[in-house]
């Protein structure tokens, strides 16, 4: 049984990533592939319990360093219980956010030390790095307006202020340049159909 492929979606708030995760899962499934849709933080019962801790409450509830440890605790459980078993069974895994979100939110945005992030990543993710990471890019004001307009309960990160979100956008772009072999920057402006076509074009190289 050939190992499945691992595709992750990344980007700031309100970039339309989650809609496009759904579109890609449908399109891949239609080609006959077995596809598992998942998300971070979360994606396994233990990791979802950690998600509840990190996405709600006041903006300063956790320091960026504590947040980073919680994100990697949730990622460890998610990899053990969901991602690795699915890839080993030959399924493709499409994940809404993964480690680049820790590098951007806790690192570039929050100021957590890069060497701590990379040490955790080596230990926890190791060789199970994504085959492809699609990084959604959108002007910060547009994304935040969309995200806050949703009126969701999980607003802890949205409430961190415009400067934080500007550092995030730059952070995501810089991280994508640091891993050019797997990261593709996706222009997230335009209609959902236009963005879905850009995503599909970016996925072609990893298709069987
Ligand atoms: P979501 O709204 O895309 O589901 O993500 C929940 C929040 O978690 C989002 O505001 C970004 C944040 N997050 C981090 O700060 N670090 C991480 O490593 C991950 C995966 C998410």
Image (cartoon, grey):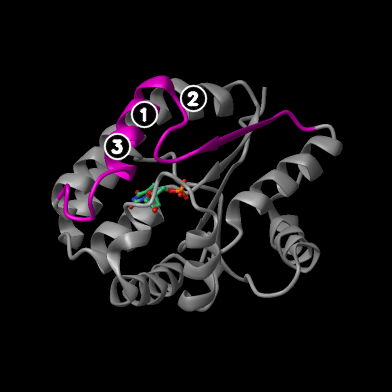
Q: State the residue in front, 31 or 146.
A: 146
- Badge 2 marks a residue whose secondary structure is helix
Q: Residues within 10 Å of mark 3 (few under 14, many from 20)?
A: some
Which quadrant of the view contains residue 73?
A: top left
Image position of 178 (left or right of 116): right
- Mark 2 or mark 3, which has the lower sequence index? 2
Q: Is mark 1 within 8 Å of ligand 1?
A: no
Q: State the residue in front, 79 or 196.
A: 196
Name the residue at 76% across, 63% down.
Answer: 201
Q: Position of residue 198 (x, y in %)?
A: 73, 67
Q: Residues within 10 Å of mark 2 (few under 14, many from 20)?
A: some
Residue 47: give its label: 1
Q: What residue did someone put label 2 on?
A: 82
Residue span colored magenta: 33-62
109 in magenta: no
* Labels 2 and 1 touching (C-beta < 8 A): yes
The correct choice, above or below, for 23 with respect to 53 in the image is below
The correct choice, above or below, for 95 with respect to 79 in the image is below
Q: Position of residue 43 (x, y in %)?
A: 47, 30
Which quadrant of the view contains residue 114?
A: bottom left
Q: Position of residue 206 (x, y in %)?
A: 69, 51
- Badge 3 marks a residue whose secondary structure is helix
Residue 124: give its label: 3
């Amino acid at each position: 049984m050939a190992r499945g492929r691992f595709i992750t979606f990344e980007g700031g708030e309100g970039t339309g990533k989650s809609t496009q995760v759904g579109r890609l899962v449908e399109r891949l499934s239609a080609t006959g592939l077995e596809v598992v849709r998942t998300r971070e933080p979360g994606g396994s019962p233990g990791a979802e319990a950690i998600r509840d801790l990190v996405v709600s409450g006041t903006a300063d509830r956790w320091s960026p360093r504590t947040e980073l440890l919680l994100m990697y605790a949730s990622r460890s459980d998610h990899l053990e219980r969901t991602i690795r078993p699915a890839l080993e069974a030959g399924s493709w895994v499409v994940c809404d956010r993964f480690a680049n979100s820790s590098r951007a939110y806790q690192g570039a945005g929050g100021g957590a030390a890069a060497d701590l992030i990379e040490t955790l990543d080596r230990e926890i993710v190791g060789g199970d790095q994504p085959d492809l990471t699609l990084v959604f890019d959108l002007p910060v004001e547009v994304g935040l307006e969309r995200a806050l307009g949703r009126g969701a309960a999980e607003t802890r990160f949205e409430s961190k202020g415009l400067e934080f979100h500007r550092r995030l956008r730059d952070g995501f772009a810089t991280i994508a340049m640091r891993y050019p072999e797997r990261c593709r920057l996706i222009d997230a402006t335009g209609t959902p159909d236009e963005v879905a076509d850009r995503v599909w074009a970016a996925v072609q190289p990893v298709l069987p």
